[in-house]
Image: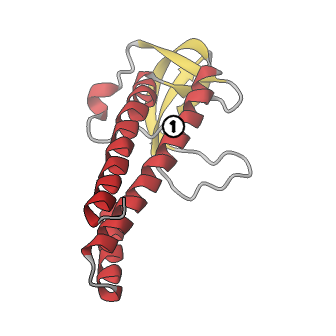
Amino acid sequence: MEFVIIYIIIAVILSMLTNSLFFILFAVLTLFIFILLFFDIWFLYIITKLLRTKPRTGRFLRVDTVKDAGEKVNKFKYKVAVYSVEGKECESVFPAEGFFGIYFYDSVKEYKLRLFEKEGRVFDRYNIASCITWPVFGTGMLTAAVFALVMLFRFRGYI
């Protein structure tokens, strides 16, 4: 939602500065490309963390607000799934699902988890699914956005 508001503000500012639809589309597409590129790089970083994990089994305990980790100050208080792994409570890497969470988390079953021992956090199956699907989906969207930008330049006559 915040991205839409940012796009609207940029479009209004650019329409006040220029009367060209080309520059408005160029700015919006370029910003969209940078956002997608940032998320692709971030997910590649998360995948490298996932590759350094060890398989464990654990039981879901609850959905709780993320704790502050030592000196790191967490400005964004979001909810994460908390699992019991080998007697220790470990938070999930990604935020917990809020709307469909009652269908995702079951405290009766044992879950196969991937423990990132350095941080004491776990990847559950939904985190792993996100790590697999986003690079495919995000890279596809990034390719489409770059293609649209190239087509915009070709239509304008710059290429």
- Tell whether 53 sits left or right of 155: right
Determine the residue positioned at 35% across, 35% down: 137
Q: Closest to the observer: 57 or 44?
A: 44
Q: Which image quarter: residue 21?
A: bottom left
Q: Is residue 14 above or below residue 156?
A: below
Q: Position of residue 126 (x, y in %)?
A: 40, 26
Residue 147 relative to residue 49: left or right:
left
Q: Residue at x 51, y 17 (%)?
A: 113
Residue 102 in view here: yes
Mark 1 element type: helix
Residue 2 in view in this figure: no
Q: Quadrant of the N terminus?
A: bottom left
Image quadrant in which you'd find residue 134: top left
- Residue at which label 1 appears: 43
Left or right, 115 with reference to 37: right
- Color style of the picture: secondary structure
Residue found at the very far bottom of the displayed protein = 16
Q: Where 139 sits versus 1, above or below?
A: above
Tag 1: Cα neighbours inside 10 Å, few (<14), some, or many (≥20)?
some
- Quarter of the figure with the C terminus: bottom left
Q: Nearer the viewer, residue 27 or 150?
A: 150
Q: Is residue 128 above or below residue 38?
A: above
Please identify the quarter of the rendering in which residue 56 is found: top right
Task: Pinpoint residue 69: horizontal percent, then vertical percent.
Answer: 67, 45
Residue 155 on image: x %, y %: 25, 61
How far from the left and from the top, in percent, is residue 60? Answer: 45, 23
Tell which residue pokes out farthest to the right in this image. 71
74 relative to 118, above or below: below
Counting every numbered tag in the picture gives: 1
Which residue is depicted at the point 56% across and 26% down? 122
The residue lying at 34 percent from left, 80 percent from top is 14
